[in-house]
Amino acid sequence: MYRRAVLGSALAASLAAPALAYPDRAVTLVTGFAPGGSTDVTARLVADRLGPALSGGRVVVENRPGAAGVVASDWLRRQPPDGYTLMLVEASSHALAPNAVQGGTRYDVMVDYTHIAMIGTGPMIMVVPPGSPARTTAEAIARFREASPETLPFASSGVASMPHLSAEMVAAVIGLGGRFPHVPYRSGGQMVESIARGETQWGVAVLASAAGQVNDGRVRAVAVTGLERFPSFPDVPTLNESVLPGFDLENWFAVIGPRGLPPEVTAAVNRAIRAAIAEPRLRERLLTAGVAPWTRPNEPRDAEAFLGAELAKFRGVVERTDVRLEP
């Protein structure tokens, strides 16, 4: 009798106890690029503040580089939807690659993931070695047109990455599409280092990858690719205002999870992200790194709608530049 009473009390207590709070262990935030690049830098800035915003949890960054984020994106869709494996994605893997990979990616951006929240946007930035004769946007474009293209190889963070697409788009607009030798690297950091050393002669980097080297004078910034100048680099003109009117190409960052993430987990992470990027200190650090924190509506449905629109936009950009990635 006593044993039955004890068991009954224990069962009643277990049924009455609330579900285990999320998170009860570290959350992994995956990036599809090597350490040192724009996605890695942004992920670490966000993870530093996202952990405390998630009920004092801990968020660790894991790098899974390969094919401009495609490898990590394909891996993520096969992970359990428990909220402990998330990914910081950018335009390369979730707008460009689905349109540029021959035959399409294995993953469907709009089907295989839970879209959680946007982090921010940032322009690309055209950089040259510090010893380059091109000191202005006009001089850089003039050099492209006058020199033999084979003497002006450009660097990127990988085939069909945003830097690859951006450089090819610049070349296409000035009538030299596909003419400049392309030297792909594994990350934005490696890409910018190659330009700083003069191993390649130019590149259009994600601003977060190049901000430090620009500030240190290791590379020279000649233009940004947005319609307006970026607040942290007010002296760097846009291609739009100088030599290529209407030129507009920006990168963006979002946090996603595997398909089927529980709604309460999605909501918790979304609230934590919105709280984190509202912090003045994180906003300042993101801006310094070349990322403008998201200011538009930022519920999961907003992130999903934005990614859908970007997929459609990049379809046209890929058709124009003919940037392709072998599966």
Image (spheres, grey):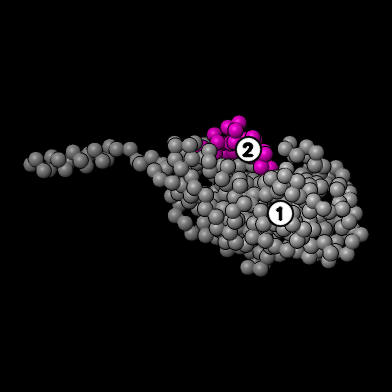
Crowd class of label 1 (few under 14; some 14 to 19; many from 20; radius 10 Å) = many
Residue at the outermost left position: 1
| Residue under the image location 26 percent in, 41 percent down | 14
Q: Is residue 293 magenta?
A: yes
**In this rendering, which labeled residue sits more in front, label 2 or label 1?**
1
Q: Say whether residue 305 is left or right of residue 141.
A: left
Q: Give the x, y percent position of residue 11.
A: 22, 42
- Location of residue 161 by image quarter: bottom right
Q: Residue at x 75, y 46 (%)?
A: 217
Residue 180 to residue 216: above or below = below
Residue 108: image x %, image y %? 58, 58
Callout 1: helix, strand or loop?
helix
Q: Amino acid at mark 1?
A: Val
Q: Which residues are magenta?
A: 272-301
Residue nearest the observer in this picture, 227 or 49: 49
**Is residue 73 among what the camera can see?**
no
* x 52%, y 60%: residue: 75
Q: Quadrant of residue 229?
A: top right
Residue 184, position as x, y percentages in the image = 70, 62
- Among all residues in the image, which is located at the extreme top? 280
Q: From mark 2 to mark 1, how far is it between C-alphas?
A: 20 Å
Q: Secondary structure at mark 2?
A: helix
Is 2 colored magenta in this rendering?
Answer: no
> Could you classify mark 2 by the number of other residues whose Cα lies within 10 Å: few (under 14), some (14-19), or many (20 or more)?
some
Count of labels shown?
2
In the rendered structure, the answer to whether residue 310 lies left or right of residue 170 reads left
179 up-or-down from 6: above or below: below
Q: Which residue is mark 1?
A: 192
Q: Is residue 118 above or below residue 74?
A: above
Q: Is residue 58 left or right of residue 147?
A: left
What residue did someone put label 2 on? 285
